[in-house]
Amino acid sequence: MKISKILSYVVLAVGALGIILWFVMNGKIGDLMAESGVSEARDLSLEAASSAVSPLYNLTLVIFIIVVVVTLIAVFSALAKNPAGLKKTAIGLVSFLLVVGIGYGLAQGVETPLKDGEVLSAGGSRWVGAGLYVFYFLSAIAVGLMVVSGIKKLIK
């Protein structure tokens, strides 16, 4: 049996398990709401709601870990098979880190009070700003490359 067929069955099984857990979670939340005498799920206590949601959360966590591990294995096996691709990957990674460094350098950190009474540190604020700058830079680069590609196609 091919690996793609096996993966299709695994995805189908995980999807079915997720749907079953979703129905179980919805049923539990409905029962908890009736027991607590509340009309909306957001009015439930955190302890009561977490007992209903934890199976679905655990499934999500397991799937996330599996996807990350499989992705890393696939990436490293592809790089091992094609050493020339390693150079391109390193260039892309260094370029991305350069953009992140520029974004971090441009960002300013200011302690910011949050709605829940906590305070976002200056360092945390600087990383948020850096993330925004990186998003803007990468978006501009993507749009610019699409424009250049479109112009090249028009010229041909």
Image (cartoon, rainbow, N blue to C red):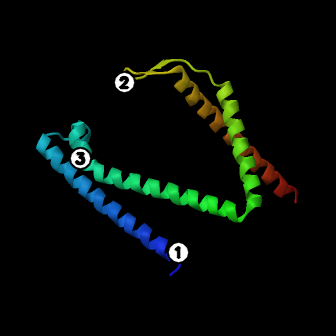
Report the front residue among 7 and 142: 7
According to the picture, the residue beneath numbered tag 1 turns out to be 3
Q: On the image, which quarter does residue 95 sit in?
A: top right
Residue that appears at 41% across and 69% down? 12
Residue that appears at 88% across and 56% down? 155
- Looking at the rendered structure, the secondary structure element under dot 2 is loop
Closer to the chain start, of discs 3 and 2, is 3
For the residues marked 1 and 3, what is the alpha-carbon distance in whole angstroms? 36 Å
Q: Which amino acid does label 1 sit on?
A: Ile
The quadrant of the image that shows the C terminus is bottom right
- Visible in this render: residue 137? no
According to the picture, the residue beneath numbered tag 2 turns out to be 116
Q: Residue 51 carries which label?
A: 3
Residue 114 pos. (x, y %): 42, 22
Residue 31 pos. (x, y %): 16, 50
Report the front residue among 24 and 151: 24
Q: Which mark is residue 45?
A: none
Q: In this view, does 52 lie above or below 120?
A: below
Q: On the image, which quarter does residue 50 sit in?
A: top left
- Looking at the rendered structure, the secondary structure element under dot 1 is helix
- Visible in this render: residue 75? yes
Residue 77 pos. (x, y %): 63, 63
- Looking at the rendered structure, the secondary structure element under dot 3 is helix
